[in-house]
Image: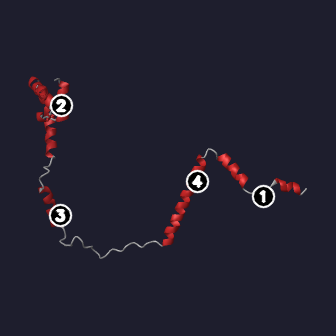
Amino acid sequence: MNAQRFTELVEAYGAEPARWPATEREDALAYMKAHPRDADNLLAPARSLDTVLESGRLDTTDTSFLAARILKAAQESDGMELPANDVVGGPTRLPRRQPVWRSIAATFVITTGVGFAMGQTAAAKSARIAEAEALLSLTLENPYDSTDLWEDL
């Protein structure tokens, strides 16, 4: 055990040897006996930190603090007793429902928007967009047919 490792043990586990790892505890105690002044200089601040940390620890089985808080809250209340299932102020009003046509219109707008967005996304990702446009132009009626122009002459 050297001074650096002893310092690491004290900083990590505190001043209480029972908290130190069992594999290094004997070596650390031997270091404390061999170097009492250095060990005391390291252990003094660790003991004060351990004291502060232990003072904040509450016993988890002790419910007296909780009981005191409940009693204090009961004494500070205005004394109005109300059963747990009663509602102060009478029955609550349910919010008015919107007319059915608004729901239908909103559904139509949303589905139209989603359909348009999906169509735009699919068209943008298509690798054969030029071929599709050419095929579409062939199937559509063209009002400017070149054969009509030559018949008039």
- Determine the CA span between mark 2 and mark 1: 93 Å
Q: Which SS class for mark 4?
A: helix
Tell me which numbered mark, 2 or 4, is placed earlier along the sequence. Answer: 2
The residue that label 2 is drawn on is 9
Quick one: label 3 or label 2, which is nearer the N terminus?
A: 2
Which is closer to the viewer, label 2 or label 1? 1
**Helix or strand or loop: what does disc 2 sit on?**
helix
Would you name the residue on which mark 4 appears? 119
Judging from the image, what secondary structure is the residue with disc 3 in? helix
Q: Label 4 to label 1, Cα distance in Å?
A: 28 Å
Using the image as rendered, state which of residue 52 and residue 109 is in the foreground.
109
Alpha carbon of mark 1 to alpha carbon of mark 3: how far?
87 Å
Q: Is 56 placed above or below 78 here?
A: above
Q: Nearer the viewer, residue 41 or 18?
A: 18
* Label 2–label 4 contact, CB within 8 A: no
- Mark 4 residue crowding within 10 angstroms, few (<14) / some (14–19) / many (20+): few
- Residue extending farthest to the bottom is 90
For this orientation, the residue located farthest to the right is 153
